[in-house]
Structures are given as C-alpha cells and as structure tokens.
Amino acid sequence: MTPGNLVRVADRLSHLRGAAMKLGQMMSLDAGDALPAELSQIMARLRADADPMPPVQLQRVLTAEWGHEWRLRFQRFDDKPIAAASIGQVHRAVASDGRELAVKIQYPGVRASIDADVDNVAALLRLSGLLPRELSIAPLLAEAKAQLHEETDYRREGAQMEAYRGLLAGKGGYVVPTLAADFTTENVLTMTFVDGVPIEDMVSASQTERDRIASLLVSLVLDELFEFGVMQTDPNFANFRYQPESRRIVLLDFGATRPVPAATADGYRTLLYSGISGDGEAVKRAAIAAGFVGKEAARRHEALIERMIEIIVAETAREGPFDFADRNFLSIVREQALRVAQDSEAWHVPPTDTLFVQRKISGMALLAARLRAKVDVRSMVVARIGTETTAI
C-alpha cells in the first residue's frame, strides 16, 4: 500500500468499468482508518475521474440514441465530460429552448459485462484467501448483479430521481435535479444542471457549517430508513455536492435506489433503541436477529462480542453531539472484531437488504468523519423512533 502502488492500482481501475471500478470507489471511502490520508486522496480519483469515451465513440453512442441530427437540438453540447465514473460520463449542454442540462451517457458494453465483472471480483476474493470456501456468498452476488443491472437502466433512475424530488418536497436543505424526459433513454439520462462544489471541499468550512452538512446527511439516511421506505444505497462521495450560497446539498445519481423492507427497518429500529437505552444484552439480541452477528460467532466468541457491544453502547448512549472525527473507540472495536474474523468457522453473511442499507450508513459516517463533524445523532434517532418501541 505504498503511494506508488496505489497510483498504479487507481490507474488500472480507472480504465475499468462496472463492478471492478465500484470496488475501487468503495476502497476510496476511507476516513484514515485503513489508508493514510495521501493514499485515500489518490484513490479518490475513482469517484469521478475515470477514462472517458473517445470522441468518435461518444458521437456513435449519441447518434444511436438521438439520431444523426442530434446536435441540432442543442445550442451547445460540451464534448469534454465534466465527470466520468464507473458506468457513465457526464456532459454539460444547453438545449435549444435554453435549458441548462447535465447529460449522463452510459459506456457501451457495461450492461453486458456486469455478470462477468461480479464473478471476477468474487473469484479474486476466493483466490486471495480472504473468504473461506465454505462461506456461501451466492445470494449476495446475485443481488449485486441485479443491483448493477438496475443501475444501467437510466429510465428507471430518472423515475427514481423524480420520486425523490417528491419525497424531499418541503424538506429544506436538499436539491434534486429535474428530469429532462425528452432527452432521456435507457442509455442516456438527462437532467437539469445543478451547480455545486464537491462536498469534500467543505472540510475547510467552519465547524458550524460542517456540522450542519453532516446533520443533513444523517437526517436523510434516517428519513430513508424510517419514513421513505426507500434508500439511495451508493455512498460514493461524488453523488453529493454542496451549494455554499444556498447551503443545500445537491443529490445526484439515483441508480442504486432500492426499497427498504419493513423487517430491515424494524431491525435497525430495535438495534438503535437498544443502543440509546444502554441495554447491551438487548443490543446483542437485536444484532443477532437483524443478521449483523451470526449465532455461531456469538456462541464461539461471546466475551469479545460483548466487549465490542459494551464500547459501542457507551458511545451511543452518551448525551450530546457525536464527534465523527474521534475514531479512537473504533480502533478498539476493530481490534476485537479482527480476533473474531480470524475464526473462519464463525464467519457470517448478513441479509443482502441489510448490507445495502449498511453500505449507505457506513459511507455517510465516513463522509461525516472526513468533514470532522459533530452531530447530535442520538437526538435525531430519538425524534424518529421515540423512547419506547414495540420492536424489541
């Protein structure tokens, strides 16, 4: 994990598409826990700085989608993309009627390569010895393939984006682009262009502003989990931008939006309630019931797991703002978790719905850590689930 090697890894992943590049993007969502800061910055290239399509290929794709005369529909179309990521690249344009647009164009062949990409990543994990052969991840792989196939359906993503506009109507602090349906196809997603700066750039803002941004992110996740019943599960930081003037978060990329089953939300509700109540035994029962902890792991490593829960409960039951920049307790929890992880017979794959939700929750926690934010998460949770619950 030297800088030179990380540059080479990032460079190779930036040439790839789909699942392989998404793996690199997830590696880049680090708050200094796994990678040194300079290496996290190198991997951050993968969020919106992949290799774009050559101009000839771009012309061929848009001609196939919009016809040979497509440029006549625009006052201006910038051939150089403003972003290029795992599935598509984004161009700015001005329609003939004056609308300022962002046009996301899917890379040719991405949809056809998804199954092979996922299988290759799984094979790499197997060959590396990171996963024991007896651990079945077939259901997770099937779900990952299905999710990626949905992400390549831009008409579906456009509908999800419009649905989010409705869900967030009346909730201040967020901006969702408007779908340009007349320019949208299965392989081209077009929306109003919404300006903003990378949300990570706000690390230099005041503590008050950083706290406010992180509070909005936490609030959105809680609304998705407990109110909307649907969640955009891709925490890639490039999906969130910020408008310093309006003080609003711009939400982009709704391809990974998926329903949150009631049982999954109930599992989190019970787990959170148990944590803020300071009831370690209830936390353990809830973690096992929700699938976070396998029954075999709980049996074989009871003391280690109870120690982890004790540390986490002490943090979650504490009144006042939670300091996301304080990672000290996480290093202690990680030390205990690694000891459990060394026992391959105790390994366990949580339910796929829980994994997708947790991916978003963990990603937003990492972003809040990157912003060095302090948020009264406990009060926000209590406001949504109350101080009593029938879920336990």
Image (spheres, rainbow, N blue to C red):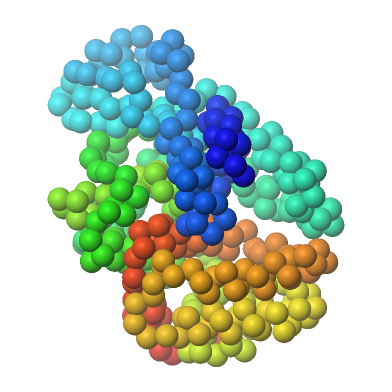
Up-down: is 309 above or below 205?
below
Residue 100: x and y, percent?
20, 31
Q: Nearer the viewer, residue 224 or 295?
A: 295
Residue at 42%, 16% (x, y): give it. Answer: 58
The quadrant in which residue 158 appears is top left
Left or right of residue 109: residue 340: right
Q: In which quadrant of the rendered image does the C terminus lie?
A: bottom right
Residue 2 in view of the camera = yes
Residue 150 in view of the camera = no
Up-down: is 279 above or below 120?
below
Q: Nearer the viewer, residue 48 or 188?
A: 48
Left or right of residue 329: residue 378: left
Residue 286: x and y, percent?
60, 80
Residue 261: x and y, percent?
53, 65
Residue at 65%, 70% (x, y): give it. Answer: 335
The quadrant in which residue 69 appears is top left
Residue at 69%, 41% (x, y): give it. Answer: 121
Q: In which quadrant of the rendered image does the N terminus lie?
A: top right
Residue at 34%, 77% (x, y): give it. Answer: 321
Residue 12: x and y, percent?
59, 30
Up-down: is 52 above or below 6?
above
Q: How many marks?
A: 0
